[in-house]
Amino acid sequence: MKFLKETILSQGNVLSDTILKVDSFLNHQIDPVLMMEIGKEFKQRFENKKINKILTIEASGIAIGLAVAHAIGVPLVFAKKKKPSTMESMLSTKVHSFTKNIDYDICISREFLNKNDQVLIVDDFLAMGNAAEGLCTLCEEAGADISGIGIVIEKGFQSGRDILEKRGIQVESLAILDRMTEGEIKFK
Ligand code: 5GP
């Protein structure tokens, strides 16, 4: 996706060989025009799939998820990182964070994810695949079908895609980074 790649090159900050900071358009301040384009692009890439729900993780996935949900015309559900005291029947699993190097629990109310759902999972980054795997686990627990996984920025030099494709899931990434050595971003 040309517009996204140009934005990554002009505004992305390479923090190390493995971490890209995109706070000015995706992770803190959000570019609404770019988000809507991302929504349309994912709609097109998963046109042949049955989708009745978009699934992501708070917080960075929500803006992306909303854009995709609006483009496809289905609801968005996001996994929470803290169990709300008001949530009674829930699905939950543990996820390891690549950027923070900690484990955390994610949960979703059974009310919003069940065996009738055909889910498109979306997220901002794909690194080792733990966040997306966690969302797949919640879908499996719920008996929901996974229609695909849509990622905005994939770090192609990490192993996330292999893990997800081994599950037989279609993975679509809008920008795939080949490397980020010496502060320079190269796409695949
Ligand atoms: P994974 O679970 O695939 O290892 O990592 C994906 C999650 O970690 C994403 O939800 C994202 O929030 C975070 N993440 C992984 N790599 C990066 C990165 O290079 N930059 C930023 N900003 N977040 C990342």
Image (spheres, rainbow, N blue to C red):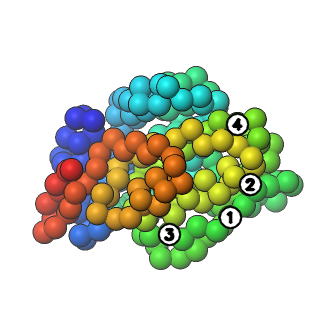
The disc label shown at residue 141, or none: 2
Contact, mark 4 vs mark 3 (Cβ under 8 Å): no
Distance from the alpha carbon under mark 4 to that under mark 1: 19 Å
The mark nearer the N terminus, 1 or 2, is 1
Camera-side mark, 1 or 2: 2
Q: In which quadrant of the rendered image does the N terminus lie?
A: top left
Q: Which residue is mark 4?
A: 117
**Would you say 38 lies left or right of 187 here?**
right
Pointer 3 residue = 97
* Disc number for residue 70: none
State the residue lying farthest toward the bottom: 101
Is disc 1's CB within 8 Å of ligand 1? Answer: no
Q: Nearer the viewer, residue 90 or 81?
A: 90
Q: Residue at x 52, y 41 (%)?
A: 148
Amino acid marked by disc 2: Glu
- Mark 1 belongs to which amino acid? Thr
The residue that appears at 29% across and 45% down in the rendered structure is 175
Look at the numbered disc 3 and say if its residue's Cβ is closer than 8 Å to ligand 1: yes
Few, some or many C-alpha atoms within 10 Å of disc 3 (few <14, some 14-19, many ≥20)?
some
Q: Please give the residue where the numbered disc 1 appears in the rendered image.
A: 93
Give coordinates of residue 49: x percent, y percent: 54, 29
The percent position of residue 173, horizontal first and vertical second, equals 37, 44
Cβ atoms at labels 1 and 2 below 8 Å apart: yes
> At label 4, which amino acid type do we have?
Asp
